[in-house]
Image: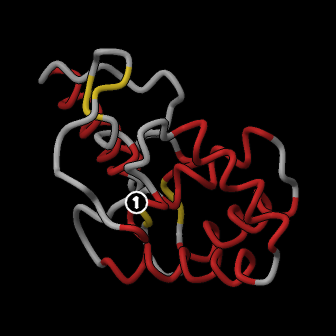
Amino acid sequence: MMQPYAERFSGILAEFGYPPCLGKIMVNNPSWCQSVSEFKQTVGSWYKNPTPDHMMNLAIFMDAKSVSGDEALLKEVRTHLSGYLDSDVGMLMSFARAVNQFDEDGRGFFAQILGHKSTKWILKNGNIPCGAWHSCIGTQSKN
């Protein structure tokens, strides 16, 4: 149901000069645009099967921001994931390594905890602001 809108949104971004994310972390990727219940299962699967890609996906997810719609949807999934992380120090350490690989200058998940020194755009690969694509990650509905 949301896919045509996601495709159009991504197409418009491309028309404005924002190239598609090479990692496909975009709103038009069904893996990143799910219902809350589906996303809870997805992040649970990433947590329970800690491959490097899954750890990176967790880091990307934790860095996501709600740009439109009901912010509580993203918060609900993030709270669900935090329930796993809060009880597993070893996994938290693995997760921190993945975050550091993705976020070289410390402006992601841990910067949210520690605070930002300044506000600026971070360019990855000279293309686009670092947060532009994963900021568009969305959830469709509560179920």
Q: Which residue, given by chain and number where applicable, does mark 1 sit on?
A: 111
x and y, in percent, of residue 140 in the image: 43, 67
x and y, in percent, of residue 10 in the image: 29, 34
Query: Which quarter of the picture shows residue 82?
Result: bottom right
Report crowding for label 1: few under 14, some 14 to 19, many 20 or more residues within 10 A (C-alpha). Answer: some
Q: Tell me if residue 33 comes above or below residue 123 in the rendering.
A: below
Give, as a three-letter code, the residue at label 1.
Answer: Ala
The residue lying furthest to the left in this view is 16
Q: Tell me if residue 50 comes above or below residue 19 in the rendering.
A: below
Left or right placement of residue 108 versus residue 23 in this view: left
Asked whether 129 or 14 is in front, the reply is 129
Does residue 62 appear in the picture of this structure?
yes
Asked whether 44 or 126 is in front, the reply is 126
Asked whether 61 or 138 is in front, the reply is 61
The residue lying furthest to the top in this view is 126
Residue sitting at x 73%, y 39%:
53
> Which quadrant of the rendered structure holds the N terminus?
bottom left
Q: Tell me if residue 65 comes above or below residue 108 in the rendering.
A: below
> Which quadrant of the rendered structure holds the C terminus?
bottom right
